[in-house]
Image (cartoon, helix red, strand yellow):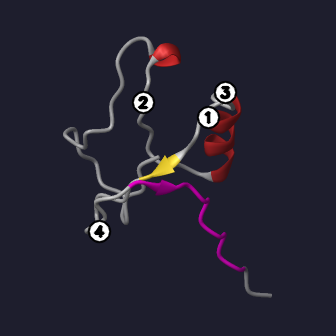
Amino acid sequence: MVRYEKITICTTSGVYNGAEIDTAKVLWARELDPVQNAKLFAYFKDRQIWLVEPDTDNTELIPYQAPLAPRLRQ
């Protein structure tokens, strides 16, 4: 999972996959909203999900944890 700090439209982001994603050793996906992420995780339920954050100086893969949803004011 690739998490960007801000939404940008970039055609050279490096997040792409080959045609046979079901059999690929590594898959790349941009982090989306929780519903879309859940669909992806359900489809690839037997895969380990890792996080990379290219907008930071993060040079490591860490186990993916979904970000906490912001609290709504009442």
Does 68 appear above or below 8? below
As measured in the structure, the alpha-carbon distance from the residue carrying label 3 to the one carrying label 1 is: 5 Å
User: Which residue matches tag 1?
Assistant: 40
| Secondary element type, mark 4 | loop
Does 39 appear above or below 67? above
As measured in the structure, the alpha-carbon distance from the residue carrying label 2 to the one carrying label 1 is: 14 Å
Upstream in sequence: badge 1 or badge 4: 1
Residue 11's quadrant in the figure? top left
Callout 3, which amino acid? Tyr
Asked if marks 3 and 1 touch (Cβ < 8 Å), the reply is yes
| Secondary element type, mark 3 | helix
Upstream in sequence: badge 4 or badge 2: 2
Asked if marks 2 and 1 touch (Cβ < 8 Å), the reply is no
User: Which residue matches tag 3?
Assistant: 43
Residue shown at 33% from the left, 30% from the top = 16
Residue 53, position as x, y percentages in the image: 36, 59
| Secondary element type, mark 2 | loop
Upstream in sequence: badge 3 or badge 2: 2
Residue 52, position as x, y percentages in the image: 39, 54
Residue density around tag 2, few if under 14, some if 14–19, many if 20 or more, within 10 Å: few
Q: Is residue 63 left or right of residue 57?
A: right
Residue 10, position as x, y percentages in the image: 23, 45
Q: Which mark is residue 26?
A: 2
Q: Which residues are magenta?
A: 61-71
Callout 2, which amino acid? Val
As measured in the structure, the alpha-carbon distance from the residue carrying label 1 to the one carrying label 4 is: 24 Å
Upstream in sequence: badge 3 or badge 4: 3
Residue density around tag 3, few if under 14, some if 14–19, many if 20 or more, within 10 Å: few
Give the label, 3 or 2, closer to the camera: 2
As measured in the structure, the alpha-carbon distance from the residue carrying label 4 to the one carrying label 2 is: 21 Å
User: Which residue matches tag 4?
Assistant: 56
